Amino acid sequence: MTLMSELESNIDYHGSRTISLDPIKSFGLKISDFFKKDLDEYFRIKSSEKSGKRYEFLGVKSYQTLYRNTYQRVLSKIVGEDDIFVLDKSDKGLTDNIIATKAAESLHTVAFPFFLYDSLNSYAQGDMVWGHTASVLNLIINVYPIMLQRHKRNRFEKILEHRANRGASKCQL
């Protein structure tokens, strides 16, 4: 079972009333329809993000290279596989990856305010060294991964849209 199919199998749909994502469910939280609309809006790629230039300007591709050469290598050695993040380029694989980017982004989004609070609290107490350290860690551990997930999801959605349009044009001939 690939990592992406394992992620998809961890998503349970309970009718039309509640959706539970496994990382969230493990904390005993459920997302109701009330919040689902807000989450769908949050995860929707905005028109200003569609080109991807903003993320490239902010160095997301450099961060991705750094990530692949450090954390991903260490994680691959721990798991015992050569490359644990091999991208399945089929439509289902891209859809699985879109789901995975939403789950990963959710975790970093939840962690962000805790790091922010810690850095602001440190500044308020006059501990500038830890305030700066916590701010930089928040950028590295949360902000850049959030941007990376959004950038990747945008690319996956563009590929799926292109394939759908190409398929639709073939059917019209």
Image (cartoon, rainbow, N blue to C red):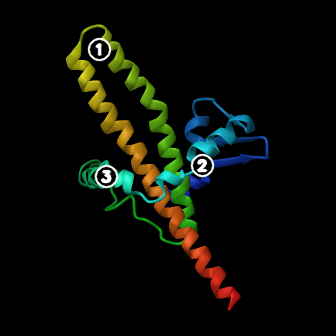
Does residue 133 appear left or right of residue 87 in this picture? left
| Residue 45: % across, % down | 54, 52
Percent x, y for residue 50? 48, 58
**Which residue occupies the foreground of this view, 84 or 60?**
60
Tag 1: Cα neighbours inside 10 Å, few (<14), some, or many (≥20)?
some
Q: Dot 2: few (<14), some (14–19), or many (≥20) neighbours within 10 Å?
A: few
Q: Residue at x 53, y 56 (%)?
A: 98
Q: Amino acid at mark 2?
A: Asn
- The front one of 43 and 27 is 43
Residue to which mark 3 is pinned: 57
Q: Which residue is mark 1?
A: 123
Q: Earlier in the sequence, mark 3 or mark 2?
A: 2
Quadrant location of the C terminus in the rendered image = bottom right
59 or 22, nearer to the observer: 59
Looking at the image, tell me whether mark 2 or mark 1 is earlier in sequence order.
2
Q: Residue at x 58, y 34 (%)?
A: 26
Answer left or right for 114 relative to 123. right
Q: Label 2, on which residue? A: 10
Q: CA distance from mark 3 to mark 1?
A: 29 Å
- On the picture, is 81 further left or further right than 25? left
